[in-house]
Amino acid sequence: MKPQRLNYFFWQSVLVTTSVMGMFIGKLLPAIAQPIRTAEIPDYQQQLLAQETITNSVVPIRKIRSFKQIEHPFTDAQKLVQSLPIPFKAQVIPVTAVKLNSTSKGLEVILQTGVNSQRLQLTPKTEGNSYIADIFNAQLRLTGGNIFRQQKPAPGIALVTVTNVDANTLQITVTGEALAPTVELFDSNEGLVFGVTSTTSTAQQPTLLQQKPSSSENQAPIELEVIGSPDTGYNSTNTSVGTRTNTPLRDIPQTVNVIPQQVIKDQHILYIGDALKNVGTSTERYPGSQDRFIIRGFNSSFGNILIDGLRGFSLGGSPALNLNNIERIEVLRGPASVLYGRAGLGGIVNLVTKPPLKDPYYAADFSVGNYDSYRGSLDFSGPLTTNKNVAYRLNASYLNSDSFIDFYNEERYQFAGALSWDIDPNTKLTFNSSYGDYNSSLGNEGLPAIGTLYPNPNGKVPISRYIGQVGTTDIITTRLSYKIEHRFNENWSIENAFGLLNVHFSNNPQGRGVPIALQPDNETLTRRRFVQAGDSFQNGYDLNTLVTGRFKTGSLEHQLIVGTEVWLELC
């Protein structure tokens, strides 16, 4: 396009745009002027004069205001109510006294207002083990101050507080010792009554406001039937891997998956890799070696496996480890694994061992499967003293199995023990130990692509064919650890733990024949022999100390964790 034609096109576009804008403004101005005119003007010149006057009265905006200078509508209902004129606001009702009365069900909290409590605007909610109610048109005005606080007023109730949030809002908080209490609201001549019932089973939502019946009224009893599915043991509520403290899963922002003991038992899981498939982790098990897994693209090496929060197998697998003494498996995904120092960026896996029980427990299990698979296990636990401050737990398991792969045989057994001692109500000492022996006849050599994935003129290679050199691999693992916990008070505690790990590798003295390549005749395989003289060892030592504290700054609650860790690995 030439410059002259381009200029012509440009001015033509400007004229068309101006015409369209003129038509739009011509239609818009009468619409703006219509509410201002008080009567119809029949004369054309008078009508034009009126429109010119209206047009001249519009002041153009020459300066564009910033976002902060623009007045925005209210986004908070409380602020909107506070901004209303006095006639539109609800009258602020003073609460002159707070009374606590013990009942057969628990406790009654009475806010004495001297007026009908139905005029109070109440918004209840439940957070953790606390029932919280905000009253937006009430104020606490006591003779001794504007804060009411009572600790342990009734069994199962830890604390009752009533405070002023602002000039128009009052807040009442009832905290249960274990779970949130059940609260019913009543209207009485004294004021608003909170009927509090402590619960040890399930935290319930508060009920709606209702009229409290008088003693003279005879009402028929109400029968309430609750039907629900039984607890299957599949839902875990707490975990320690996300914050290094026993924290509810709902309060942890990181991605944490927990595989409880019931899932391991129902699925008859023998290996860690099979258990991790329940949470979407990619796994692979090498015959004659160990389980390996991949979390968010990173493999399981560099200390990704923890045992009770202490470093486990840093070689990247799980040899000679049986799940018989594992209570649950916790998986922490993502870079939050740096909480444990040196670890893979994809995440870590924490194996929590079975703790000693205060009550006697005995269990035995035996199973038979394909490929001449036999497995048996024992699990014993109970107290050692009459006051149950010392308890023990013993686990033993044995496995012998062949495979679909030729010449393969696997044998493993493990013994594990734990001892706990409650030195005093605030101090606890726990010892753990395990010994495992894993013996396998083969390694993981794979099969050539030609004859399996691609056709081979000499025929198909069966998946049961073993093309390596038959030998044995023996891995013995010994682990000892202790953990001592002490609570200074309700808010501060200290924990010290130490773990020792020894892994002994006994290789085939004849070495390994590793396949290298398939020759052009598609039937001759080249193998390379690797011989490792003597046995190999790996020793690991892990020592860590954690100090945990809870404190408040104003209305904010904080949890502080400070600790050190020393890890030494010798090969």
Image (cartoon, rainbow, N blue to C red):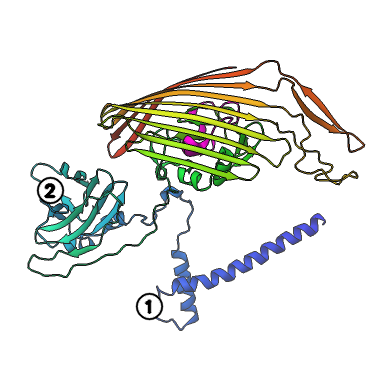
Residue at label 1? 38
Q: Is residue 346 left or right of residue 158?
A: right
Q: Which residues fall within the magenta stretch?
A: 313-342
Q: Is residue 260 left or right of residue 504?
A: left
Amino acid type, callout 2: Arg
Q: Residue at x 39, y 80 (%)?
A: 39
**Residue 526: % across, % down:** 85, 29
Amino acid type, callout 1: Thr
Report whether residue 153 is seen. yes
Image quadrant in which you'd find residue 81: bottom left
Residue at label 2? 141
Image quadrant in which you'd find residue 53: bottom left
Image quadrant in which you'd find residue 120: bottom left
**Residue 234: % across, % down:** 45, 49
| Disc nearest the viewer among 2 and 1 | 2
**Residue reaching furthest to the right:** 521
Q: Mark 2 falls on what kind of element?
A: loop
| Distance in Å between CA atoms under marks 2 and 1 | 56 Å
Q: Quick one: 207 or 501, which is closer to the camera?
A: 501
**Residue 367: % across, % down:** 54, 44
- Residue 472 lies within the magenta run: no
Indicate whether 374 appears above or below 58: above
**Residue 348: % across, % down:** 53, 34
Tell me the number on the disc at residue 278. Answer: none
Q: Compare marks 2 and 1 and give the one earlier in the sequence.
A: 1
Point out the image quarter for the N terminus. bottom right
- Residue 315 lies within the magenta run: yes
